[in-house]
Image (cartoon, rainbow, N blue to C red):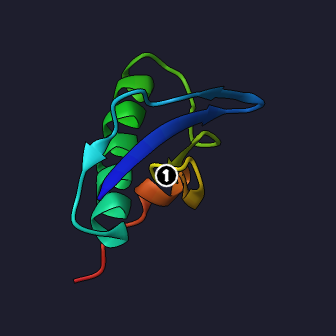
């Protein structure tokens, strides 16, 4: 299944034109969290706080399946 990771920054939405082929929504959630962590790490190094931004994960019809706030990436994964 193809998932698109649109980037939401306040009222601005940057659409993911390529998307990623992943097996299911759980894998898409994991990918969004991983990507958010990478972006947040870069922002912290630059002295910026982007924890209020988010990924909106959509399907091929551009239906929003889930929203992953970047602050969710700060949580430690459950073992």
* Residue appearing at x 31%, y 36% in the figure: 38
Residue bearing the label numbered 1: 57
Residue at the top extreme, as displayed: 46
> Which quarter of the rendering shows the N terminus?
bottom left
Identify which residue, 29 or 42, lies in the foreground. Answer: 29
Residue at the front extreme, as displayed: 61
- Residue 21 coordinates in the image, percent (x, y): 23, 50
Please tell me how many numbered marks the rendered image carries.
1
Q: Quadrant of residue 49?
A: top right
Q: Quadrant of residue 14?
A: top right
* Residue appearing at x 37%, y 54% in the figure: 33
Q: Is residue 8 above or below residue 48?
A: below
Identify which residue, 63 or 78, lies in the foreground. Answer: 63
> Which quarter of the rendering shows the C terminus?
bottom left
Image side of residue 18 versus residue 16, left or right: left
- Residue 55 coordinates in the image, percent (x, y): 52, 45
- Residue 56 coordinates in the image, percent (x, y): 55, 48
Q: Is residue 38 above or below residue 43?
A: below
Q: Is residue 32 above or below residue 12?
A: below
Residue at the bottom extreme, as displayed: 79
Image side of residue 34 versus residue 43, left or right: left
Helix, strand or loop at label 1? It is strand
* Residue appearing at x 54%, y 34% in the figure: 7
Q: Is residue 43 above or below residue 66?
A: above
Q: Residues within 10 Å of mark 1 (few under 14, many from 20)?
A: many
Identify which residue, 76 or 54, lies in the foreground. Answer: 54
Image side of residue 5 versus residue 37, left or right: right
* Residue appearing at x 29%, y 49% in the figure: 34
- Residue 37 coordinates in the image, percent (x, y): 35, 44
């Amino acid at each position: 299944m193809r998932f698109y990771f649109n980037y939401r920054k306040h009222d601005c939405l940057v659409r993911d034109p390529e998307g990623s082929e992943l097996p299911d929504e759980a894998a898409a959630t994991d990918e969004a969290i991983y990507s958010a962590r990478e972006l947040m790490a870069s922002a912290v190094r630059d002295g910026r706080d982007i924890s209020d931004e988010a990924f909106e994960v959509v399907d091929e019809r551009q239906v929003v399946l889930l929203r992953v706030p970047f602050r969710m990436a700060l949580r430690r994964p459950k073992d």
